[in-house]
Image (tube, rainbow, N blue to C red):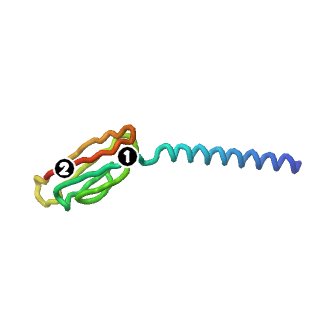
Amino acid sequence: MWDMTEESCRLMNLSSKILFIMIVFFAFNVWAQDCAHLQVKTDLPSSKIYVDSVLAGEGNIELRLTNGTHNIVVLEESDRWDAKSFNDNLIIRDCKDTVLNYSF
């Protein structure tokens, strides 16, 4: 048969585990926040800019990225078969800001 003190100890133990998990999650979430400012500038306002396979905008964009390797793709908006495109890998370390310029 459960005693009232045993039940309260069990609940306190569970709540302390939940609190510990929340603190660890928060610490890793804060540590991995976006830190580097990226500007991508093109001379063609209709060009499509993708960052890590996600459309980030058209023409010129500004966004923040985490440290690590990111894939940047800039596509000329055109119906031609020979439309120009740029594909770059950007390595961000120490939260350094970056400006990329593309001319079509």
Mark 1 surroundings within 10 Å by alpha-carbon count, few (fewer than 14), some (14 through 19), many (20 or more): some
Q: Which residue is mark 2?
A: 102
At label 2, the amino acid type is Tyr
Q: Is 66 drawn above or below residue 43 in the view shown?
A: above
In percent of width and height, residue 8 lies at 82, 49
Q: Which element is circle 2 on? A: strand
User: Picture quarter containing residue 27?
Assistant: top right
In percent of width and height, residue 101 lies at 21, 49
Left or right of 52, for residue 79: left
Left or right of 80, for residue 53: right
Q: CA distance from mark 2 to mark 1?
A: 20 Å
At label 1, the amino acid type is Ala
Q: Residue at x 29, y 51 (%)?
A: 39
Q: Which residue is mark 1?
A: 36
Q: Residue at x 11, y 58 (%)?
A: 80
Whichever of callouts 2 and 1 sits on the residue coming sooner in the sequence is 1
Q: Which element is circle 1 on? A: strand
Q: Residue at x 23, y 59 (%)?
A: 59
**Which callout, 2 or 1, points to the residue nearer the camera?**
1
